[in-house]
Image: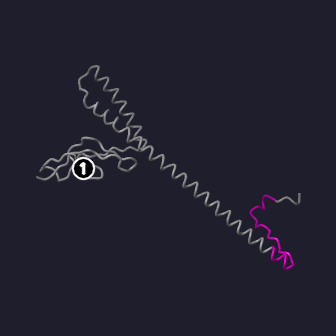
Amino acid sequence: MENERSPFLEDAAEEVPLPPAGPAELDAFHALSAEKAELEDLLKRRQADHENFRRRAERERAEVYEIASMETVRMMLPTVDDLERALQTIPEEEGPLREYAKGTHLIYQRLMETLTKLGLEPLETVGQHFDPNLHHAVQKEQRKDVDEETVLEEYQRGYNFKGRPLRPAMVKVSVKS
């Protein structure tokens, strides 16, 4: 029982053995001490390298996931556009077509909720100042009643993905006459 270490003394400094008395033993002791320090340093470096590798791999995995999500969302945008156009063409009067429109609208809402959770952000364009990074001007109109380079109409919605431009909005822009 006397040879066992007490759990209460684990934080205490380790005992450092005294070097042997002779010069040959002293040289061997210093060589072994230097080798031990070298190996401890090597171990610490390898542990740090492993931790850096683990962090880098995790960061790269997250980037690949984000790029894959972004591309998936980009490929779904034409479907979103088609649903929006379909909803715009349905007449307002009651009837069997109106029930169809409600179902289509619910599908559209669910799809947009899912894409928003992934990071899709629709751009607000009408009335905004034209920004070539966010808007693609497909038509210009001379207007005196609004400021120059103001977005007048949106032909196709633009989107950001987690704050980054995904697709510019196709818009009509005002110009001074």
Q: Which residue is drawn at 45% across and 47% down?
A: 66
Left or right: residue 38 versus residue 112 is: right
Disc 1 element: loop
Assess whether residue 18 is covered by the magenta stretch. yes
Residue furthest toward the top? Answer: 96
Residue furthest toward the bottom? Answer: 23
Rendered view: 160 above or below 12: above
Residue 82: image location, x then y, percent? 31, 33
Range shown magenta: 6-28
Three-letter amino acid code at disc 1?
Gln
Q: Residue at x 35, y 47 (%)?
A: 166
Residue 74: image location, x then y, percent? 38, 42
Q: Which residue is drawn at 40% across and 41% down?
A: 73
Residue 84: image location, x then y, percent? 30, 34
Rendered view: 149 above or below 117: below
Residue under pointer 1: 128
Q: Residue at x 82, y 71 (%)?
A: 17
Rendered view: 82 above or below 148: above
